[in-house]
Amino acid sequence: MTKLFPALTLVSQTEQQVSLLLEISADIHWFAGHFPDAPVLPGVTQLDWAVHYSKRYFSAFAEVVSVEVLKFQQMIRPGQQLLLVLERSAEQTSLFSYSRNGEKVASGRLKWSLTSDA
């Protein structure tokens, strides 16, 4: 059975920042067909995971309104380990960055609508 999300370890968590260690295994669904001989994690999946985990750890965030300064610097392949850092930078803004061995792999800024509880 394929997975939609990577194995995850919570590294650190504060009110403003969360660091997650992601194990990118070959059985993640999003590698299928992208590309058969040299699998690469699609950028849209990287963005989806950043949104998913931001909503999970910053409960005031409801829906993404816009994505800004989105950068994909390096390819993500099966068998890699990534650090995903999520940072709440303002009331309705968060930053995310993926890194591997201290090198940035992808990053961006998300603008959010807030839940009615915020």
Image (cartoon, rainbow, N blue to C red):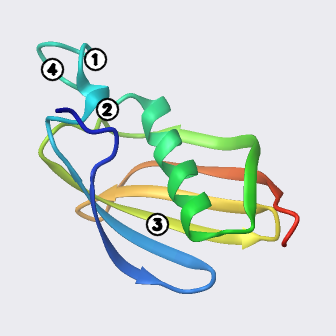
Find the distance from the CA under tag 1 to the CA under tag 4.
8 Å
Q: Residue at x 23, y 19 (%)?
A: 32
Find the distance from the CA under tag 2 to the CA under tag 4.
10 Å
Quadrant of the image for the N terminus?
A: top left
Q: Earlier in the sequence, mark 2 or mark 1?
A: 1
Q: Which residue is mark 1?
A: 34
Q: Residue at x 48, y 57 (%)?
A: 97
Which of 46/118 is in front?
118
In the rendered image, residue 115, in percent from the top left (x then y), is placed at 82, 61
Amino acid type, label 2: Leu
Q: Which residue is mark 4?
A: 38
Q: Which residue is mark 2?
A: 41
Quadrant of res 94: bottom right
Q: Earlier in the sequence, mark 4 or mark 3?
A: 4
Q: Which residue is mark 3?
A: 85
Find the distance from the CA under tag 4 to the CA under tag 3.
26 Å
For label 2, the crowd category at 10 Å Cα-Cα, with few meaning under 14, some 14 to 19 and many 20 or more, is many
Find the distance from the CA under tag 3 to the CA under tag 1.
25 Å
Disc 2 to disc 1: CB gap under 8 Å: yes
In the rendered image, residue 78, in percent from the top left (x then y), is placed at 16, 38
Q: Earlier in the sequence, mark 3 or mark 1?
A: 1
